Image (cartoon, grey):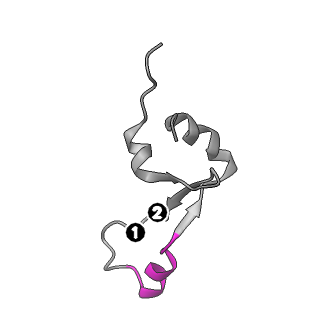
Amino acid sequence: MPKMKTKKAAAKRFKVRSGGSLKRAHATKRHILTKRTTKNKRQLRGMLTISEADRKSVARMLPYA
């Protein structure tokens, strides 16, 4: 049986915490930030835990995480 491949796009977007939960960044924080308010950019800092609805599909993309 060959090794399963990790989806590299998912590996760049999600990180596994020590407890096994997955974290992700906020959306719309990459570029074209000049039109966003300082308050909005500040509130987009930090990481979020992915929802339970998405957990199964993300875990399938990251077989060795």
**Residue type at tag 1:** Lys
Indicate the quadrant where residue 56 lies.
top right
Residue 26 covered by magenta stretch: no
Name above or below for residue 13 compared with residue 2: below
Q: Which residue is mark 2?
A: 27
**Residue type at tag 2:** Ala
User: How many residues crowd around disc 2 within 10 Å: few (fewer than 14), some, or many (20 or more)?
Assistant: few
Say whether marks 1 and 2 touch (CB < 8 Å).
yes
Q: Position of residue 33 (x, y in %)?
A: 33, 75
Q: What residue is shown at x 48% (from left), y 75% (from top)?
A: 45
Q: Position of residue 28 (x, y in %)?
A: 42, 66
Q: Secondary structure at mark 2?
A: loop
Q: Secondary structure at mark 1?
A: loop
Q: What residue is shown at x 48% (from left), y 12% (from top)?
A: 1
Q: Position of residue 42 (x, y in %)?
A: 47, 82
Name above or below for residue 44 compared with residue 58: below
Q: Which residue is mark 1?
A: 29
Q: Nearer the viewer, residue 6 or 55?
A: 6
Report the span colored magenta: 36-46
Measured in 3D between alpha carbons, the distance from the residue under mark 1 to the one under mark 2, in whole angstroms, is 6 Å
Q: Which residue ends up furthest to the front in the rendered image?
A: 18
User: How many residues crowd around disc 1 within 10 Å: few (fewer than 14), some, or many (20 or more)?
Assistant: few
Q: What residue is shown at x 49% (from left), y 74% (from top)?
A: 44
Name above or below for residue 8 compared with residue 12: above
Q: Position of residue 61 (x, y in %)?
A: 50, 36
Q: What residue is shown at x 63% (from left), y 45% (from top)?
A: 55
